[in-house]
Amino acid sequence: MIRRLAIILSFLPTCTAAHDIGCDHKPVPDNIKLSCCGPADYHLLDMGQITENPDGSYKVTNDKYTFTIPAAKAEPAPDGCPAIFYSEAMKGADGIPIVFCFMIPFTL
């Protein structure tokens, strides 16, 4: 019985969290996740979700949130994948999650 269950389970697809795969379809390197994460979570973006505002800040639309991120908070994306780091558990008074890091390839 246990052997049969093990065989069945081996055929089920494995799931990887979306924040574990980068824009290049490779696993996100730990050094990128650890450089910002802490309590935050890695959320992959595409460049269509990012707009540079006239004052140099960035408007980032991700999932159900729209963030305004100061230019000084933008960091170069070491893997070329734009990403935002935030935690659903840590929100500001406006109900928007607090952004810990914002990485962008600087090619807007």
Image (cartoon, rainbow, N blue to C red):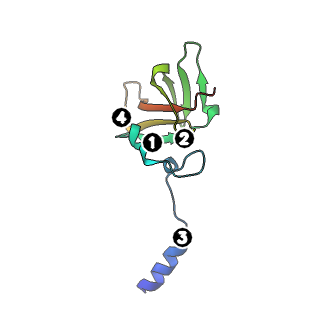
**Residue type indicated by callout 4:** Met
Q: Nearer the viewer, mark 2 or mark 3?
A: 2
User: Which badge, 2 or 4, comes first in the chain's sequence?
Assistant: 2
**Residue type indicated by callout 1:** Ile
**Residue type indicated by callout 2:** Asp
Q: Residue at x 43, y 29 (%)?
A: 96
Query: Please, is residue 7 above or below residue 47 in the view?
Result: below
Q: Nearer the viewer, mark 1 or mark 3?
A: 1
Q: CA distance from mark 3 to mark 4?
A: 34 Å
Q: Residues within 10 Å of mark 4 (few under 14, many from 20)?
A: few
Q: CA distance from mark 1 to mark 2?
A: 8 Å
Quadrant in which residue 108 is drawn: top right
User: Which badge, 1 or 4, comes first in the chain's sequence?
Assistant: 1
Q: Locate the N terminus and report the quarter of the image it occupies.
A: bottom left
Residue 83 location (% of width, % of height): 52, 37
User: Circle 2 sits on which residue?
Assistant: 79
Q: Nearer the viewer, mark 2 or mark 4?
A: 2
User: Circle 1 sits on which residue?
Assistant: 32
Residue 80 location (% of width, % of height): 57, 38
Q: Residues within 10 Å of mark 3 (few under 14, many from 20)?
A: few
Q: Which mark, residue 12?
A: 3
Q: CA distance from mark 1 to mark 4?
A: 20 Å
> Mark 4: which secondary structure?
strand
User: Which badge, 1 or 2, comes first in the chain's sequence?
Assistant: 1
Mark 1 in CB contact with mark 3 (< 8 angstroms)? no
User: Circle 4 sits on which residue?
Assistant: 90
Mark 1 in CB contact with mark 2 (< 8 angstroms)? yes
User: Which badge, 3 or 4, comes first in the chain's sequence?
Assistant: 3
Q: CA distance from mark 1 to mark 3?
A: 30 Å
